[in-house]
Amino acid sequence: MYYGLSNFYQNHRRYVKSRDDSQLNGDNSSLLNPSKECEPYRTNEDKPIAPCGAIANSMFNDTLELYRIDNDTRTPITLIKKGIAWWTDKNVKFRNPTGDGNNLTALFQGTTKPVNWPKPVYMLDSEPDNNGFINEDFIVWMRTAALPTFRKLYRLIERKNNFQPTLQAGKYSLDIAYNYPVHSFDGRKRMILSTISWMGGKNPFLGIAYITVGSICFFLGVVLLFIHHKYGNRNTSADIPN
């Protein structure tokens, strides 16, 4: 399950730079003294923001729940929230601050939440291995998209067995907790279901691009071959008078 956004320019130069990778990597000094690249989302009420920057401040926070409907009975579909981030991001690039004990509330003491967040970073999840800077929803959002229309992995739906499809044919309903406004930038939101493999989800862009570029190269090759056969055998040398 993916969520998609349209007309959201995550590739803007100032937006892409508005983060502190040292802070996200768990550096205690950067936690309390974020990079100036995070301005104007570096501090709030004289406290350092954790995580700082425009990328973190604009994190997608709608909640999506999928149900199967059988005889007016709604059965929730199990959505897996772990395993959606890249391994290198989860285990290398993003780390929580270190200190005495594993109490994230104490480790983030002296900081404040991003301006647009309803709760601080140490309350993103109840499970310790998916909370703070290593929350996978947060990590997925922090990997910025190259185009203004994009989608990001939201949840995984595992197949129960190999004899039945992951989502059987039938009626489903989608419940959305609307927390993320898009009217201000004339955007649109969508939910996408896709089957993924070791190569990722279905994406026709590369296939279309390869066919288009290949067709152009073939056409240019035919044109150049015609020009070569028609004009390539002419004697262009000129007699030089004595």
Image: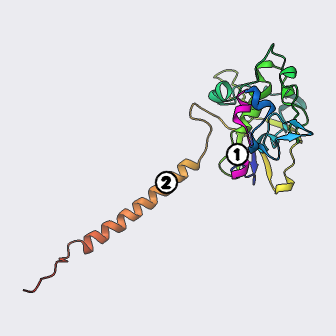
Return the x and y of residue 237 as percentages of the image width and height: 16, 77
Determine whether the residue tagged by mark 2 lies in a helix, strand or loop.
helix
Q: Identity of the amino acid at label 2?
A: Ile
Viewport quadrant of the C terminus: bottom left
Question: Tag 2 or tag 1, which sits nearer the N-term?
Answer: 1
User: Taking 228 as reference, is 194 above or below it?
Assistant: above
Determine whether the residue tagged by mark 1 lies in a helix, strand or loop.
helix
Nearest the camera: 29 or 100? 29
From the image, state whether disc 1 or disc 2 is nearer to you: 1
User: Taking 220 as reference, is 164 above or below it?
Assistant: above
Is 227 contained in the magenta span?
no
Nearest the camera: 185 or 17? 17
Image quadrant in which you'd find residue 143: top right
User: Taking 19 as reference, is 216 above or below it?
Assistant: below
Return the x and y of residue 228 as percentages of the image width and height: 27, 69
Return the x and y of residue 240 as percentages of the image width and height: 12, 83
Q: Label 1: which residue?
A: 17
User: Taking 189 as reference, is 81 above or below it?
Assistant: above
Q: Identity of the amino acid at label 1?
A: Lys
Determine the main secondary structure of the stretch shown in magenta.
helix
Return the x and y of residue 222 as percentages of the image width and height: 35, 65
The segment highlighted magenta reads 13-26
Drawn side of residue 186 relative to residue 208, left or right: right
Query: At 69% across and 25% down in the image, what residue appears?
Result: 159
